[in-house]
Image (tube, rainbow, N blue to C red):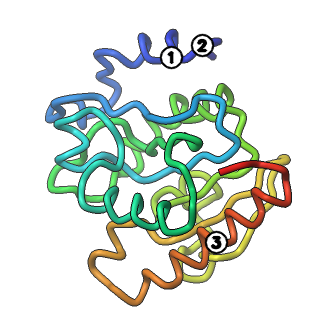
Amino acid sequence: MYETFEELEKAIEGCKKCKLANGRTNIVFGTGNKEADVMLIGEGPGADEDRLGEPFVGKAGKLMNMAFEGLGISREKVYIANIVKCRPPQNRNPEDDEALACLDYLRNQVILVKPKIIVLLGSVALKNILGKEYGITASRGNWVDRKGIYYMPTWHPAALLRDEDKKIEFWKDLKEVKKKASELGIEL
C-alpha cells in the first residue's frame, strides 16, 4: 500500500500489468478533491480521457457535469476515478484480467481519499466493487452500506447518451447522493 497520492501515481507510471498498456496515450489516474467525502467510480477512460489524461472529460463527462450543475454539486468537491486506468480498445468494457490488474490501484485510491459515499457509475464499476452477483438494472438507485461506506449504483453517463430515458433515473440517483451527503454533514 502507498501512503500518499504521489507515491501511488509514481507506482502507476509506466504500468504494464495488462495488455491495455500497449494502446494507451496516457494513464488516467483520477481527478478531484483528494480528501473528498464523495467519490465516483466509472469503468475506464474513453478516447478523450486517454488523450487528456483525465477521467470524464468527453461527452459522458460533459453530461455528468451538466447533472452536477443542475443539482448544485461541485465537481471540485468530489473525487473521480475508474476501474481501469488505461483505455480499452474501441471503448469496450474492461476484461476481468484488466480490471483485476488495476483494482489494487483503485483500492489504494479509496484508502487515501477515505470517502463516506461512493457512486458506482455503471455495471463494470458495480460488479468489480460490490460483486459479480449485482446487476445494474436491479441495483441502481438502491443504497448499499458496506464497511461504513454508502454505495449508490447508478447508470454510467455514457449509457445516458444511448438511452435518454435513463437520464431521469440518473438525476434521481444523484439527488439521493446529495440528500445522503446532507444527512452526513457533507457539503457538495
Amino acid on which the number 2 mark rests in the picture: Thr
Q: Residue at x 60, y 57 (%)?
A: 119
Residue, disc 2: 4
- Looking at the rendered structure, the secondary structure element under dot 3 is helix
User: Mark 1 falls on what kind of element?
Assistant: helix
Give the x, y percent position of residue 177.
Answer: 68, 64
**44 w.r.t. 167: above or below:** above
Q: Report the residue at 59% width, 29% height from top.
A: 34
Disc 2 crowd rating (10 Å Cα; few below 14, some 14-19, many 20+) is some
Q: How many marks?
A: 3
Give the spatial CA distance, label 1 vs label 3.
Answer: 32 Å
User: Between residues 60 and 41, which one lies in front from this camera angle?
Assistant: 60
Q: What residue do we see at 29% from left, 29% from top?
A: 27
Tags 1 and 2 touching, CB below 8 Å: yes
Structural distance between the alpha carbons of marks 2 and 3: 32 Å
Q: Nearer the viewer, mark 2 or mark 3?
A: 3
Which of the pair 149/176 is nearer the observer? 176
Residue on which the image places disc 1: 8
Residues 111 and 39: in front is: 39
